Amino acid sequence: MTNPFADLNQFIDMPRVNGLALSPDGSKLVATIAKLNEKRTKWVNALWSIPLDAAGHPHRLTRGEEGDSLLGFSAAGDIFFASKRDSGDDAKPQLHRLPAGGGEASVVAERHGGFSNLLADRAGKRVHVISDAVVGATDAEEESEIIKARREQKVSGILHEGFPVRSWDHDIAPTRPQMFVADAAGLDDDSLEFAQLTRFPRDEELESFSMDDSGDVIVAGVGRLVRGITGQSVLVRIDRTTGEPTEIKADEEFDYYGPTVSPDGSCVVASKSRKQNDQTPLAQRLVSIDIATGAETLLGGDFDEFPGEVAFSRDGQWVVSAVDHEGSGAVVAYPITGGAPSRLSDERLHFSGVQVHPEWPEGASSSIYALADAVDRPATPVVLSASGMTTRLPSPVAEVDVHGRLEEVFTTAEDGTELRSWLCLPEVASEEAPAPLAMFIHGGPWGSWNAWTWRWNPWTAVARGYAVLLPDPAISTGYGQKMIDRGWSHLGGAPFDDLLRLCDAAVARNDIDETKQAALGGSYGGYMANWVAGHTGDRFKCIVTHASLYDNRSFRATTDAGDHWRSHLSDAHNELASPDAHVERIVAPMLVIHGDKDYRVPIGQGLQLWSDLLHAQQAERGDNRNKFLYFPDENHWILSPGNSKLWYETVLAFLDHHVLGAEFARPEHV
């Protein structure tokens, strides 16, 4: 069997599972599958029906040339998806309905602002969506005139009065997400007439919403500007008739987000996140809030892993969530009254897209569905048994053989904390043929190497003979709050020391070549790669730094997440932990990678690092060992298929040149 990770064309061509949703009655499981278009220039999503057990066959539901995005279900089980199938300047995103009983999909609504977060009440009365709307427009006609005028007059300017002005890879436009509602009776005529329900001002943003079975109790998560660049995420109840918000929870010391309303509308469960600064670490827990009184109950007892999205059981007594856990993940059920949670999964897998069958936990057919993956296993739909074991469901995406070994490496931190990491090894690595080591440093900073990844896939390097170390140092998730706390106030301290200790433990093995090491990282991992470069001399043969923080002072003033990072990166902190102060000490060759549309870590960070690096080293023409891979149209991540292939080609060629001594193989077309 050929190794698809040894051929980047085969690797890029692999289809992938991107999402999973269960209909409210538990009869339909729908997955989103991404495949390349015919020209291999774009990922296109299609919806597939997945059998509810190991019997049966998946079948394709949609075939939009530009891709289809699953939005939700009607009370009757119709599937709603968003797609833009018309062309032209005035073409609008469309909302499609695929009837529960089968047949062709039909367009039921169009809006300039698109559609997301669709929810229909179980009584079949109303359909709610989020769509972008022009702030200040009194009706749909005026909104269309404003949009048309800006397009025809080539007006692109945006007047801001607050923060932020852009997010991730897009500008904050003169629109804001608003909630719209339609009478579900319109589905009889394949036409939903959406009316704007909320009118949040420019300094507030509707982030998400949830509602009870009746559709009468609607709770939204709203981000608002408090002062300066300081923001706050709060919970509000939306009046079903007027759209007016009434505050449920707001606290300047905490953010509340991701609300999920109980089936009977009595309470809402949300993530409560402590506001952090350079001395106060981030902490997140689930809380249940009584909607009538605002009384708050902490869920999970002493279990302090960061929660993911939650889903209620039909009886309203449990919420189920996926969490990071000790280098993998777990599906956990929290009793709504508080107390210790129950772990529902026993295997060392990472979970996402958790769906709760309406008969769980009592019914004979009760089930938990999810996407399960691991460092050596791409995401695939599964069902959890009562014993916690997972059964793979039939999927249009074939299983993948990574052609390598996955092991764990453990060591002890300076303070006595046990540290662990994954080690991906070529099948041939041995004492007789030790493998060179590439250490991948994860981003976040809070995160974990506990899941499959398409963007920093270790098996592409393993296929070329490298062992890849995936360490979880201080600030990693899945090891309790104590792991976050122990590295918080010194980003270059405990996390840096932990990384080197785990690397030392890896190279102490007889199947690893201690003389051939490289370090790579992106985002916060790029920050740490820059820190490593300035503090380890020639230990590493080369360093790859992607979308990286370099000058903490300028970064905190230009990132779209200025509220978070300005409080974290204080002047005192930056005096101790800004990588730019150590550029003169960098010895190892560096590959700098950055996208111009990266607003989380703006391009100025990469440009400044590149300029400072060249200035500090003063290499003669033709002698510069560093390289800068620049993407004018990519953001914090490299997402297009062609650029993704170029990223891997360049990174692997850089490693081969400096670690193995091979001639640098410059990729084509650059």
Image (cartoon, rainbow, N blue to C red):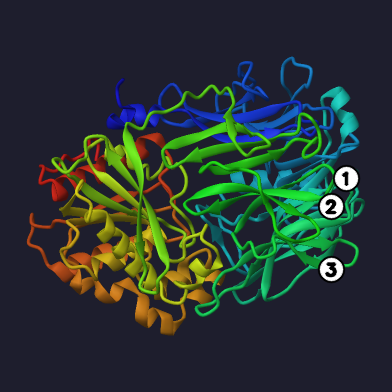
The amino acid pointed to by label 2 is: Ile
Q: Determine which of the numbered discs, if any, sits on residue 295 in the image.
A: 3
Label 2 SS: strand
Residue 274 percent location from the top left of the image: 63, 71
The amino acid pointed to by label 3 is: Ala
- Give how far apart the Cα atoms at labels 2 and 3 are: 18 Å
Q: Determine which of the numbered discs, if any, sits on residue 530 in the image.
A: none
- Mark in front: 1 vs 3: 3
- Compare residues 319 and 138 and report the one nearer the observer: 319
Label 3 SS: loop
Taking the view exactly as shown, the residue that stands out farthest to the bottom is: 572
- Give how far apart the Cα atoms at labels 2 and 1 are: 7 Å
Label 1 SS: loop
Relative to residue 244, is residue 52 depicted above or below? above
> Are circles 2 and 1 on residues that touch, CB within 8 Å?
yes
Which mark is first along the chain, 3 or 1? 1
- Compare residues 213 and 231 and report the one nearer the observer: 213
- Mark in front: 2 vs 3: 3
Residue under pointer 1? 215
Work out which quarter of the rendered image holds the N terminus and state it: top left
Residue at 54% x, 53% y is 324
The amino acid pointed to by label 1 is: Gly
Residue under pointer 2? 218
Residue 482 percent location from the top left of the image: 52, 69
